[in-house]
Image (cartoon, coloured by chain):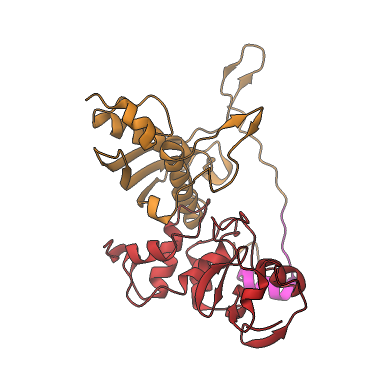
Chain colours: A orange, B red
Amino acid sequence: MRDALGGLTPREYFARHGAFSVERKYEPPDWIEWDDHTYRRDAYATYGWGCDVAELEVDPDTFEVKPIRLTAVQEFGRPIHPALARGQIEGGTAQGLGYALLERVVMRNGAMANGQLTNYTIPTTLDTPEIDVVMLENPYPGGPFGAKGLGELPMDGPAPAVVNALRNFGLDVREIPATPEHLSTCASL
Amino acid sequence: MRFTLNGSEVDVDAHPMSRLLDVLRVDLGLTGTKEGCGEGECGACTVLIDGEPVCSCLVPFSQAEGTNVRSIEGLGDDHPLQRLFMDEVGAQCGICTPGMVLAALSVGESPSLSDVQTALAGNLCRCTGYSAIYRAVLKWRGVSPDGASSI
């Protein structure tokens, strides 16, 4: 960064010269090939990988589920800005938790019938446990500066992890959100 | 009607049933206070009235008369808690941030993680998963986020 800014920090550069801009376009490497006729080979230049672990407590009387800890292990090439990347993972994991346990979209006449936060509930601080984030750094030659995409990846794993944990309690969960109302029908008593 | 806003007396001619949120944003031009849900669920519009966090979308202006209102602008531009929100990336889209910061001001000394969670339970955040916000608030109160007790 300092080389590009003539030895100055970004703050110094901005104070002296104003905004600094560079325009570059990402081109996928030529070894990534996609055949649009046969729909074969690599549709995307990068694939991220993740693994989630959900630790839960379930009240056997009320079927209330309390997440105790979530662990998200993510491989997305090189984290260019680790603090922002961690935030993306924590945020996506919490959204995935809401998807697993709370968030039910009710459609009526082609429109969402519960589009308010009073009836479409998302996780609050009290619904969101500690989230352990593990970033597996693995620079990827096909992505810009070694990176892969990250925004969507963390949202994919939490619901399967939560459902697997619930199934481990003997609850035959087949749909999400796994609300207490739904879980009460899954119990094999 | 007169009230104290961020330490200064103000006199605003607005309908007594106007939302305090609109008086701040429209009549006074202080757009730091955000409207999220507009129905008291999300806490984005949180301001402090006599030190207590309230949803300004639910407060009729007449109830603010004679009170001491603090909005995010009242913190100045370089409050330590705001800086920690920046350093820890406690804001992503930023809509919850002003309300989150004001609600967090009520967190007392040496809080546990659970204390922070309870203080912020009325403020929804869709982006961060709250973790970075906890880190910012705990550090502001001198508690190491890694060592924070969850009780």
* Of the pair A155 and A47, the residue shown nearer to us: A155
Magenta segment: A8-22
> What residue is shown at x 46% (from left), y 62% (from top)?
B133
> What residue is shown at x 58% (from left), y 43% (from top)?
A144
Q: Residue A108: which quarter of the image?
A: top right
Residue B70, percent across and down? Answer: 58, 78
Residue A165, percent across and down? Answer: 29, 34
Question: Looking at the image, is A80 positioned above or below residue B12?
Answer: above
Q: Is residue B69 left or right of residue A67?
A: right
> What residue is shown at x 44% (from left), y 40% (from top)?
A102
Question: Which image quarter is the C terminus of chain A in?
Answer: top left
Q: Residue A13: which quarter of the image?
A: bottom right
Question: Which image quarter is the N terminus of chain A in?
Answer: bottom right
Residue A134 lies within the magenta run: no
Residue A18 lies within the magenta run: yes
Q: Is residue A148 left or right of residue B36?
A: left
